[in-house]
Image: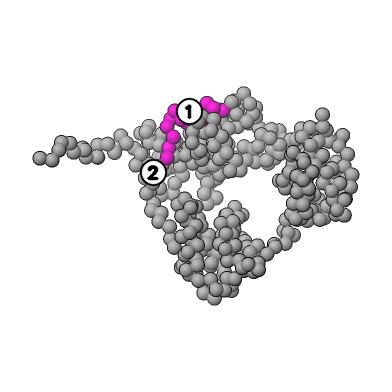
């Protein structure tokens, strides 16, 4: 069996090996798992010594060289930079490895994106997740303006170039991602004008995406499909109890994936039978906690949530490191449950639609459904009237029968 105590680390990382082992055990790693991580540290330390480098040189380019050498040597595991995330985070916390902010952008595109990111954060006050999304979605537009010699030519950018790029990109995107693209592109062009890169603003050259409100239909699951998702969770296991509790919150209360991910231990009022939901726009609202949903969450907290879980998040990873589950992780829980019962790929929002549709079938008025879903406007909830077939049937005219005379 591999254990941290049996792994010898020599070279520039030797002084940090014992502390890193303690860190791993505190994150919930088993001695065997921590031992495998220490073996990676030992290999990296030997490689750094052979290259004449030390921990202060662990920038992205050096990490890429190391993992490339590891792949070339035939290693079957820990072959990507992601394998070193924990170690690099630990070394940065000690001030040994260079901080992320010290990474220098390479190339004119990346240099411009660094300025754009700073503008979004400081001048526009956007949250980090939104900033990252804007930066990534406009990156192809800037890359398309790069010259053969590596330079970036934006001075000759025209309205036709902008609209042509949007029309080309939107042909292969869904309506939602196309809308996000044009929003981010307008933001970038506004920044380029403010920053002095463009003499005149080209935001007006970005065409709008046809996206009429209430034009679509909510794609709800049938009640038997929702039951299948819940029954697919093996509640004899830690992961199954967590996934069952997540699906219950999504299917019974119609929470969004991000709201489930943000749920903290202090947000559950067991005596009052309520939970506090952190929704859009930092709004915090109280919702009643049904008994069956509360039992599912309590089962996870009592017999599932690791004692080494970090922070106060209700839902965390079941495998070390036991960090808080992200909204993407919540979506992965739903997707995996769908695959287990043979459904097409589905997202967490489908369960929100299903909860609203089921409330409508039970006779709940739209005003109450809107309160549960925490919609700001009733017209947002009105889209569910389209799936109320029993109420719509008397309004439909009879189909004409018989032939022409």
- Which segment is the magenta one? 219-233
Neighbour tally class for label 1: few under 14, some 14-19, many 20 plus, Cα within 10 Å: few
Report x, y in % for residue 387. 35, 39
Q: Which image quarter holds the N terminus?
A: top right
Residue under label 1, please give it: 227
User: Circle 1 sits in a helix, a strand or a loop, which is it?
Assistant: helix
Q: Would residue 46 appear left or right of 284 to someone viewing this image?
A: right
Q: Earlier in the sequence, mark 1 or mark 2?
A: 2
Near-viewer residue (281 or 338): 338
Which quadrant of the view contains residue 268? top right
Residue on which the image places disc 2: 217
Left or right of 371 on screen, residue 75: right
Q: Distance between the residues labelled 1 and 2?
A: 22 Å
* Residue plotted at (50% across, 66% down): 162
**Quarter where residue 99 is shown:** bottom right
Q: Which colour scheme is used?
A: one colour
User: Is 101 included in the stretch rendered in magenta?
Assistant: no
């Amino acid at each position: 069996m591999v254990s941290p105590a049996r792994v010898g680390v020599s070279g520039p990382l030797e002084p940090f090996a014992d502390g890193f082992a303690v860190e791993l055990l505190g994150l919930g790693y088993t001695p065997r798992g921590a031992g495998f991580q220490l073996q990676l540290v030992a290999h990296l330390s030997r490689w750094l010594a052979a290259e004449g480098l030390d921990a202060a040189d662990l920038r992205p380019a050096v990490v890429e060289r190391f993992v490339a050498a590891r792949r070339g040597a035939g290693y079957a595991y820990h072959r990507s930079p992601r394998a070193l995330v924990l170690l690099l985070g630990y070394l940065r916390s000690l001030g040994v490895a260079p901080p992320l902010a010290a990474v220098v952008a390479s190339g004119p595109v990346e240099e411009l994106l660094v300025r754009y990111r700073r503008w979004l954060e400081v001048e526009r006050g956007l949250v980090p997740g939104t900033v990252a999304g804007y930066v990534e979605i406009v990156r192809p537009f800037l890359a398309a303006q790069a010259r053969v010699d590596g330079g970036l030519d934006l001075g000759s950018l025209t309205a036709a170039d902008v609209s042509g790029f949007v029309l080309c990109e939107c042909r292969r995107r869904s309506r939602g991602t196309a809308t996000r693209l044009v929003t981010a592109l307008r933001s970038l062009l506004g920044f380029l004008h403010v920053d002095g890169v463009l003499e005149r603003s080209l935001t007006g050259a970005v065409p709008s995406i046809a996206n009429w409100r209430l034009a679509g239909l909510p794609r709800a699951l049938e009640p038997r499909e929702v039951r299948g998702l819940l029954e697919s969770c093996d509640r004899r296991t830690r992961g199954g109890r967590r996934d069952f509790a997540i699906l219950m919150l999504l299917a019974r209360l119609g929470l969004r994936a991000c709201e489930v991910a943000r749920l903290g231990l202090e947000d559950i009022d067991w005596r009052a039978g309520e939970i506090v939901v952190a929704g859009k726009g930092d709004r915090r609202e109280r919702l009643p906690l049904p008994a069956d949903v509360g039992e599912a969450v309590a089962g996870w907290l009592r017999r599932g949530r690791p004692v080494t879980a970090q922070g106060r998040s209700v839902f965390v990873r079941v495998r070390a490191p036991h960090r808080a589950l992200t909204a993407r992780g919540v979506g992965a829980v739903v997707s995996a449950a769908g695959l287990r019962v043979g459904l097409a790929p589905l997202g967490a929002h489908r369960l929100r639609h299903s909860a609203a549709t089921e409330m409508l079938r039970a006779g709940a008025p739209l005003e109450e459904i809107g309160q549960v879903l925490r919609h700001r406007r009733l017209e947002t909830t009105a889209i569910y009237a389209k799936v109320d077939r029993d109420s719509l049937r008397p309004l439909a005219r009879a189909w004409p029968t018989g032939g022409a005379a």
